[in-house]
Image (spheres, rainbow, N blue to C red):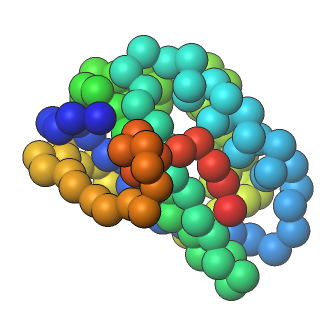
Amino acid sequence: MEPPYYAVIFSSQRTDGDHGYAAMADRMVELARQQPGFLGVESARGADGFGITVSYWATEADIAAWKQQTEHLMAQTLGRERWYAKYSLRVARVERAYGHSLQTNPDDTEPQSHRA
């Protein structure tokens, strides 16, 4: 994807136990893929429960629409009540992007929809 675009950076500390988190996280990625302006997502979580998810969007309006999506609103509420001891969210405009890959397909450096 060519800049400019937007990155929503969500860092969080999980509470103990799953309590439906994995299923909801999978559903949110599936649902985000259906939203206008969604470009991709990358996610990682350590054994200590700290994780970072970065989703990529074409415009700020696309991000605002996603924030207000009905199922996503429900997930946000459950996140505050059950899944996150704390979290931070940042929105950034990506002006430049580059990378390196040993893969022969240059598209392999694009963000993939996955969760750790």
Q: Position of residue 67 (x, y in %)?
A: 46, 31
Residue at image x 36%, y 44%? 106
Question: Viewer-proximal residue, 18 or 74?
Answer: 18
Query: Looking at the image, which residue sits at the far bottom?
Result: 48
12 is higher (above) or lower (below) than 112: below
Q: Position of residue 55 (x, y in %)?
A: 44, 44
93 is higher (above) or lower (below) than 84: above
101 is higher (above) or lower (below) than 65: below
Q: Is residue 77 left or right of residue 8?
A: right
Total marks in image: 0
Q: Is residue 27 left or right of residue 105?
A: right
Query: Looking at the image, which residue sits at the far front?
Result: 104
Q: Is residue 51 visible?
A: yes
Q: Position of residue 29 (x, y in %)?
A: 63, 36
Question: Viewer-proximal residue, 14 or 30?
Answer: 30
Residue at image x 42%, y 15%? 36
Q: Is residue 55 visible?
A: no
Q: Is residue 10 left or right of residue 18?
A: left
Q: Quadrant of the C terminus?
A: bottom right
Question: Viewer-proximal residue, 69 or 27?
Answer: 27
Q: Position of residue 14 (x, y in %)?
A: 68, 69
Residue at image x 28%, y 59%? 99
Q: Quadrant of the N terminus?
A: top left
The quarter of the picture where residue 86 lies is: bottom right
